[in-house]
Image (spheres, helix red, strand yellow):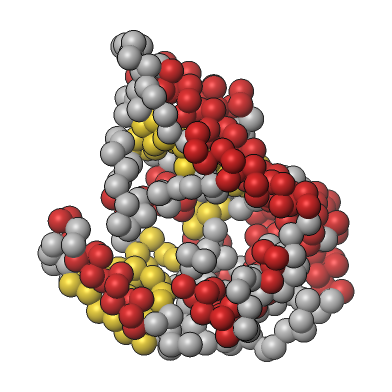
Amino acid sequence: MADPVLASMVRATGQTNARHYMAATPKIQAYRDSWVKLAPLRDGPVNLQRVAVSDLAATTQRIKDKAMELGANMVGVCRLQPHMIDLGEDVPHEFVIVACVAEDYEKVVHGANAVEEEAMRVYAKCTEVATELASYIRSMGYPARAHHNGASEVQAIPIFYQVGFGELGRHGSLINEKYGASFRPGFVTTDLPLVEDQPREFGVQEFCMNCNVCQLNCPGDAIPKEHVVTHGIKRWLIDLEKCYPYSRLRDEYCHLCVDVCPYNVKSHPETYKAFMKERKQVGYKTPKSW
Amino acid sequence: MEKLYVNEIRLDGEVSTVGLFYSRAEAENIVAQLQRLPEKADCRYEIIEAVAGLSSTNPPKQRE
């Protein structure tokens, strides 16, 4: 188990693995197996006949179109920077492409298992997209490596931020204007010359300063009131010791901080209201105006 | 569990939080890794106990 906090908590329960991982349904296990199977294909031989890049914008658009054709809903590009790479790892590429697939928010009204199955389905799709996209770029004659749940050396959040997908929310995930935090990523690092996207802000950090809905709906009380600042960006650091008893050390999935976020209301107004009505009935806080 | 912040202090005095860690050994390991990075050569690091802002301020919730 790579996560030392989780490993320590699991050991304290006398188990060898987190209960949540052991309780996977066959369908969820099949999704997990799918990204393990694709891991050996994340890198490979590069076509010796390189396609010349004369128009960077057109090449970037071609790559983004390909990712969308493969099933992504959002694609972004930025230069790969040291803070985006896992400590101790070396990724010898200039750029990173992130291809995200949106989750079906409607699953929230069908319970935790439906939400988890959807999350795993999307992660599996992201794995396919990243693997195919890396292979496509290598066929153009440029090195490219896919990063996904099966194997990765990159950090999602700083890349999301840099490509302009959104801003960090109080719940620790990045909030996008259209999809809230209900999306999952796959990445490709490459030397193919590309045009970078830029960070984009639309008021999330100010909104999260006043909205405490995720904090007040967290069953483990793991979302802090106070933020820290990292390189000028507000971050709310989730207390994993409080999160894991609900998200890893029990059978059921927990995705509540993302599901209750009011940024879901724009794209799914009726479902969000129905879901929050359920939350209110079991004693949790809903947005002030409702 | 112990809770510790690792802060990065730049030459100009800007303080930036690296993260929250749950043991001194883990925090010290992160600091050692960061100190090996050439671009962080001018930075200092501090490990401080996380107290304010992390302790629960909410009433206990019913278990889901």
Asked if residue B22 can be seen in this view, the reply is yes
Give whichever of B47, A211 is nearer the camera. Answer: B47
Q: In this view, does B64 lie to the left or right of A35?
A: right
Percent coordinates x, y for residue A230 in the rendering:
35, 64
Q: In this view, does A154 lie above or below A111?
A: above
Give whichever of A110, A281 is nearer the camera. Answer: A110
Percent coordinates x, y for residue A98 in the rendering:
48, 38
Count of picture labels: 0
Name the residue rendered at 74%, 65% in the picture: A23
Asked if residue A217 can be seen in this view, the reply is no
Quadrant containing the C terminus of chain A in the rendered view: bottom right
Percent coordinates x, y for residue A174 in the rendering:
53, 54
Q: In this view, does A225 lie to the left or right of B33?
A: right
Q: In this view, does B34 lie above or below A40?
A: below
Name the residue rendered at 69%, 46% in the picture: A31
Q: In which quarter of the image is residue B11?
A: bottom left
